[in-house]
Amino acid sequence: MSEMSCKSKNNLESKKSYLNKVTVVLGAQWGDEGKGKVVDMLATHADLVCRCQGGNNAGHTVVVEDQEYDFHLLPSGIINPKCKSIIGNGVVVHLPGLFEELKRNENKGLVGWENRLLISDRSHLVFDFHQQVDGLQELEKGSQSLGTTKKGIGPAYSSKATRNGLRVADLLGDFKTFSDKFESLVLSYQRMFPSLQVNVKEELNQYHEYAEKIRPLVVETVSYIHSALKCKKKNFG
């Protein structure tokens, strides 16, 4: 058997070993399909629940023992005390919204999330000015507007695509470098939208605090998930 065919066989066997370990939940319509409820149900049999894309826009509602939880950025499996919940590298993260969501659901009875929530170091950040830009872009389109939630999701993905966006890893690295990149990103949007107002100093002070709050939750999720699969963990995403 040639070396190439040996590798192909090994790859096939490796893929087969992942069967029955990963379940993917996809919405095939325009949202509101009940994905959150399905993931919450599946999470009772999962070791990991992973969110792979999107941001804190429309969200999901999950009811457990007559208590209603609302999740916009958090994976729906966060309720399960035996399950790790992962915000993956394809998700765009608005940190103020994330901590507001955690606080709101804590008040409803969510406990122990700090031991279960993991965030990819490669996730891109949604800033408040992304949300402002989202609204300004909608105004420009007039009657042709898309009707977005104005949560800055589109502009954040645009920053990611043009490679001037900032990731969680940037926030946790050298803060001077992060600050310089942040200011550069603000200026690039202000050239497109002269009316855009951003208090750079205030925003950076806020993100300096967020860096320490988020640091214990951040991992390199790609290798983390691969390791979990090799250890025969069950994954839902």
Image (cartoon, rainbow, N blue to C red):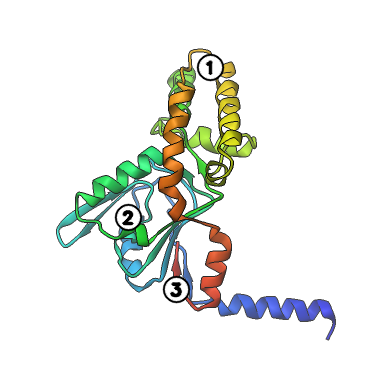
Q: Amino acid at mark 1?
A: Phe
Q: Residue furthest left?
A: 66
Mark nearer the viewer, 3 or 2: 3
Query: What is the x, y in percent for residue 149?
Result: 38, 33
Quadrant assignment for the C terminus: bottom left
Task: Give the residue at x 62% y 38%.
Answer: 161
**Residue 132 visible here:** no
Marker disc for residue 236: none
Distance between mark 3 and mark 2 Cα atoms: 21 Å
Task: Please give the name of the residue rendered at 53% of the width and 65% of the height, measured from the top-left corner.
Answer: 224
Q: Which residue is disc 3 drawn over?
A: 234
Residue farthest to the top, as pictured: 195
Please report whichever mark, 2 or 1, sits nearer to the chain's N-terminal start: 2
Residue at the spot of label 1: 193
Residue 159 occupies quadrant: top right
Residue displayed at 44% across by 55% down = 217
Q: Percent x, y for residue 75?
A: 38, 55
Pointer 3 or 2: first along the chain = 2
Q: Where 58 sits versus 224, above or below?
A: above
Q: Nearer the viewer, residue 7 or 117?
A: 117
Q: Amino acid at mark 2?
A: Gly
Question: Where does label 2 land, which residue?
Answer: 34
Number of residues whose C-alpha sits closer than 10 Å to that of mark 1, classed few (under 14), some (14–19) or many (20 or more) = some
Q: In the image, 231: left or right of 2?
A: left
Drawn side of residue 39 relative to residue 217, left or right = left
Q: What is the C-alpha distance between the residues marked 2 and 1?
A: 37 Å
Helix or strand or loop: what does disc 1 sit on? loop
The residue located at (49%, 24%) in the rendering is 200
Element on which disc 2 rests:
loop
Which amino acid, by three-letter code, is at mark 3?
Lys
